[in-house]
Amino acid sequence: KKNLEYALEAIQRFAEEVEGKIVVTSDHGEAFGEGGLWGHINKPHIPVLVEVPWLEIND
């Protein structure tokens, strides 16, 4: 949660300095020892988990 808050705050500061739209995307991530797991976890393909949500904020 802290990492997401940090990233969103940085994006907000950046957005205040530029004109136009900003697209924010991310990688799928990896396990780095959480729960004793390492690397990419092989899970079944679940469409709802891989769909890209779209959010536009107009102020």
Image: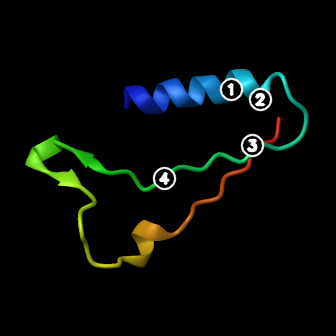
Q: Amino acid at mark 2?
A: Ala
Residue 52 sits above or below residue 22 on the image: below
Decide which of tag 3 and tag 2 comes sooner along the chain.
2
Q: For the residues marked 2 and 4, what is the alpha-carbon distance in whole angstroms? A: 21 Å
Furthest-front residue in view? 39
Q: Residue at x 25, y 49 (%)?
A: 31
Horizontally, is 31 left or right of 36 in the view? right
Q: Which of the labelled discs sits on residue 15, or is there none?
A: 2
Q: Which mark is residue 57?
A: 3
Residue tagged by mark 1? 12
The quarter in which the N terminus is drawn is top left
Q: Nearer the viewer, mark 3 or mark 4?
A: 4
Q: Amino acid at mark 3?
A: Ile
Inspect the image, locate mark 4, and give the three-letter code of the amino acid beneath it.
Asp
Give whichever of discs 4 and 1 has the lower sequence position.
Answer: 1
Q: Nearer the viewer, mark 2 or mark 4?
A: 4
For badge 1, the amino acid type reads Gln
> Residue pushed farthest right?
19
Q: CA distance from mark 4 to mark 1?
A: 20 Å
Spatial CA distance of label 1 from label 2 is: 5 Å
Indicate the position of residue 42 as horizontal and vertical percent values. 24, 70
Residue located at (59% from left, 23% from top): 9
Q: CA distance from mark 3 to mark 4?
A: 22 Å
The numbered mark at residue 27 is 4
Q: Check disc 2 and report its element: helix, strand or loop.
A: helix
CA separation in Å, label 3 and label 2: 11 Å
Which comes before the other along the chain, label 2 or label 4?
Answer: 2
Circle 2 packing at 10 Å, graded few (<14), some (14-19), many (20+), is few
Q: Secondary structure at mark 4?
A: loop
Label 1: few (<14), some (14–19) or many (≥20) C-alpha neighbours in 10 Å? few
In x, y percent, where is residue 41?
24, 63
Marks 1 and 2: CB-CB under 8 Å? yes
